[in-house]
Image (spheres, rainbow, N blue to C red):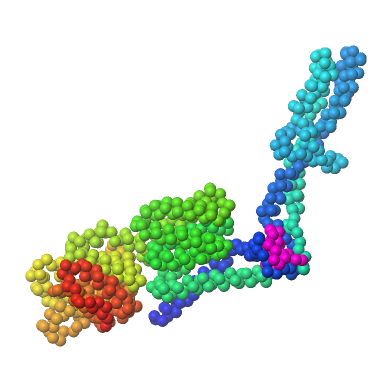
């Protein structure tokens, strides 16, 4: 059965890695790296000859610049408007009564002026053209396009004032005639052209489409750069063009893809094996391992999309990684996964060392902040700190590297990256805590508060047990830290491990103020042992009632394993020497996880040290050894991966604390510290 489960777990892990790598490659926002590495001023060791004919592509900026030039210089297109020609008969009729000599002058001048006006282009809105400072416009005439100088374009007002001026010149001494002249000409003045916006746009597009993508050609055999001569800008451009041209072939594109795939797989396998050997507790827990894989993948996909949309890696919500994994898997793993994802995101950002460093620093700040976040509300403060840190880092990095990014964009990207990180935590953490039943440090931190009703109840009803739990909790934290288990889980587990004793507190020695009033004296050892055994069952019941996480319930359930309750067994044996030992053992599961084993061990050590008559260094050290040896000999750690080496580490971690705790009463031995545990 167990083998079957292991095989299934292995299959799930393998499948997840496959999904991970494939999706990662599919959504890879790969940026072209610079292909030719030679720089201006570098001296080639030999002549560089073009191995094939290739074109020199213009850069996107160059094409963009050309486009701008075209748009700036593009001429307006003007279409003609039909207008009435001057009707001499109408004029003649109007000036019938005028002196015939003047009439002749009148008609002659009118015709002359009208002819002049016809040379102008009159439009309603010449300002539109003047604003663009275009020197010419294109007139659509029946004979075809005609280039026309913009300065000769007039507005209606300008023509009218010209007529007025001319009227005064023709009849300088007769204002009446001059007025009549003006009045008779004016009705025949109207716009003869209009700006044809549609045609103007069409022609602009046509011009843009004609922009050449290449600005030169290098023929096979041509010497691109000469041996011993520093490379010029043009030569470097040619070399880059050559490499780029090479890259465009299908084979080279395939090779590039393969290279990228292998690189990604290498990082994935590096990460996978690092987890396997450095974090066995995470590797062994399929649920947590899947959370690691899928959350990292989710992060990388969101980052990929953001890079594709914005083309700016500063938008990547990198702090999500250290925050999330700090709370789910602890600080050490948080640091590890930060480094792995920084490698991925740096690959995303065009293989940039710069971005690797940037993400590492952001990650480090994330880890740093996480230490101070105690409640979910603190995440808001975390966001502010993160936003300011990202902004300052991005600002200095961009100025140092000479990136052309606007300050407003740095501000916006810092805001979005910090915001998405925090929103990710706020939405994903509770979801994964509930649905997947994982215990995050957030839950544990909330539980470790002395205000928790169960701890208050323990303090009130069983102060001795409460004191004992507090004593163990600090030792448990240190022990767990030393052997790479979860320190916060061990600490909180220790606080709650004996909550079942709140039911019959006086039956437990630590709560008996006066040893003479031991309630066990009045009852049979079989009844006593039942009461003692029941504290585990009761503890589990209370934990479930108060919705403590599964990992804490497991600690409560397993902290005595199948240990023998020796005093009552001895007492019972005196009455009936043949009484079976089994009846005086706890009937609970044995510890499986390191944290569970730590609580069992420290529970025993703490209880035994209290019974010592003399607090000598030697006696404390021996007590620890004897409890460790007993638990192993009794088979209590048979189902747990904890080792003798772990135990040795725990011993030397807690020994100084225990000595310090009882320091006034400790008698130090002559130097004999590192004794071996057997
Ligand atoms: Fe207990
Ligand atoms: Fe205990």
Q: For this view, does 533 lie left or right of residue 114?
A: left
Measuring 75% from the left and 66% from the top, which residue is drawn there? 223
Q: Is residue 19 visible?
A: no
Measuring 12% from the left and 73% from the top, which residue is drawn there? 520
Q: Quadrant of residue 551?
A: bottom left
Q: Quadrant of residue 29?
A: bottom right
Q: Where residue 553 sits: x, y (%)?
A: 30, 68
Q: Is residue 70 visible?
A: yes
User: Is residue 466 depicted above or below 565 in this figure?
Assistant: above
Quarter of the figure with the C terminus = bottom left
Count every numbered label the image shows and give the total.
Answer: 0
Q: Quadrant of residue 347?
A: bottom right
Q: Which residues are magenta?
A: 222-247
In the displayed orientation, state which residue is furthest to the left.
516
Question: Looking at this view, is 616 or 103 the one in front?
Answer: 616
Q: Where residue 251 sits: x, y (%)?
A: 67, 71
Q: Verify whether residue 173 appears in magenta.
A: no
User: Is residue 539 depicted above or below 111 in this figure?
Assistant: below
Q: Verify whether residue 239 appears in magenta.
A: yes
Question: Looking at this view, is 310 or 213 the one in front?
Answer: 213
Q: Where residue 504 sits: x, y (%)?
A: 17, 67
Measuring 87% from the left and 22% from the top, which residue is drawn there? 109
In the displayed orientation, state which residue is furthest to the front.
228
Q: Where residue 493 sits: x, y (%)?
A: 29, 67
Quarter of the figure with the N terminus = bottom left
Q: For this view, does 118 lie left or right of residue 326?
A: right
């Amino acid at each position: 059965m167990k083998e079957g489960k292991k095989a299934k777990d292995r299959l799930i892990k393998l499948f997840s890695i496959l999904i991970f790598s494939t999706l990662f490659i599919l959504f890879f926002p790969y940026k072209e790296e610079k292909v030719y590495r030679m720089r201006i001023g570098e001296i080639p060791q030999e002549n560089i000859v073009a191995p094939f004919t290739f074109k020199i592509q213009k850069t996107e900026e160059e094409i963009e610049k050309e486009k701008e030039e075209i748009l700036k210089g593009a001429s307006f297109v003007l279409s003609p408007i039909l207008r009435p020609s001057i009707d001499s008969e109408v004029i003649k009729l109007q000036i019938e009564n005028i002196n015939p000599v003047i009439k002749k002058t009148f008609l002659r001048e009118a015709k002359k002026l009208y002819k002049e006006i016809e040379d102008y282009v009159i439009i309603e809105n010449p300002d539109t053209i003047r604003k663009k400072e275009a020197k010419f416009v294109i007139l659509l005439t029946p004979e075809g396009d005609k280039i026309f100088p913009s300065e000769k374009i007039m507005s209606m007002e300008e023509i009218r004032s010209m007529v007025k001026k001319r009227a005064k010149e023709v009849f300088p001494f007769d204002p009446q005639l001059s007025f009549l002249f003006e009045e008779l000409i004016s009705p025949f003045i109207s716009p003869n052209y209009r700006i044809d916006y549609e045609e103007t746009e069409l022609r602009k597009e046509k011009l843009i489409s004609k922009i050449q993508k290449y600005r030169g050609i290098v023929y096979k055999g041509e010497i691109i750069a000469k041996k011993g001569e520093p490379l010029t800008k043009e030569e470097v451009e040619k070399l880059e063009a050559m490499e780029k041209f090479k890259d465009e072939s299908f084979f080279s594109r395939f090779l590039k893809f393969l290279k990228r795939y292998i690189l990604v797989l290498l990082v994935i396998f590096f990460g996978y094996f690092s987890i396997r050997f450095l974090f066995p507790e995470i590797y062994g827990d399929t649920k947590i391992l899947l959370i690691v894989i899928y959350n990292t993948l989710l992060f990388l996909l969101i980052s990929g999309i953001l890079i594709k949309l914005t083309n700016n890696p500063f938008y990547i919500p990198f702090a999500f990684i250290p925050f999330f994994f700090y709370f789910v898997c602890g600080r050490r793993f948080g640091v590890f996964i930060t480094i792995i994802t920084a490698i991925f995101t740096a690959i995303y950002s065009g293989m940039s060392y710069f971005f690797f460093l940037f993400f590492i620093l952001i990650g480090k700040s994330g880890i740093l902040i996480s230490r101070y976040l105690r409640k979910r509300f603190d995440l808001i403060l975390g966001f502010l700190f993160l936003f300011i840190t990202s902004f300052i880092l991005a600002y200095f990095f961009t100025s140092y590297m000479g990136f052309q990014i606007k300050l407003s964009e740095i501000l916006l990207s810092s805001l979005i990256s910090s915001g998405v990180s925090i929103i990710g935590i706020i939405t994903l953490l509770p979801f994964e805590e509930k649905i997947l039943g994982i215990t995050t440090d957030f839950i544990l931190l909330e539980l470790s508060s002395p205000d928790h009703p169960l701890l208050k109840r323990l303090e009130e009803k069983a102060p001795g047990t409460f004191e004992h739990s507090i004593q163990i909790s600090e030792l448990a934290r240190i022990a767990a830290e030393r052997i790479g288990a979860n320190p916060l889980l061990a600490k909180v587990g220790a606080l709650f491990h004996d909550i079942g004793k709140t039911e019959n507190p006086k039956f437990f020695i630590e709560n008996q103020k006066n040893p003479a009033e031991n309630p066990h004296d009045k009852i049979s050892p079989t009844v006593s042992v039942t009461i003692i055994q029941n504290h585990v069952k009761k503890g589990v019941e209370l934990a479930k009632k108060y919705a403590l996480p599964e990992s804490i319930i497991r600690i409560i359930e397993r902290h005595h394993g199948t240990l023998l309750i020796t005093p009552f067994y001895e007492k019972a044996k005196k009455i009936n020497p043949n009484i079976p030992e089994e009846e005086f053992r706890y009937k609970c599961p044995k510890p499986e996880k390191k944290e569970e084993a730590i609580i069992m061990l420290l529970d025993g050590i703490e209880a035994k040290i209290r019974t010592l008559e003399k607090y000598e260094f030697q006696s404390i050290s021996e007590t620890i050894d004897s409890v460790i040896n007993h638990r192993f000999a009794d088979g209590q750690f048979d189902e747990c991966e904890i080792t003798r080496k772990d135990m040795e580490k725990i011993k030397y971690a807690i020994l100084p604390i225990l000595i310090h705790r009882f320091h006034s009463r400790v008698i130090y031995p002559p130097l004999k510290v590192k004794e071996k545990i057997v």
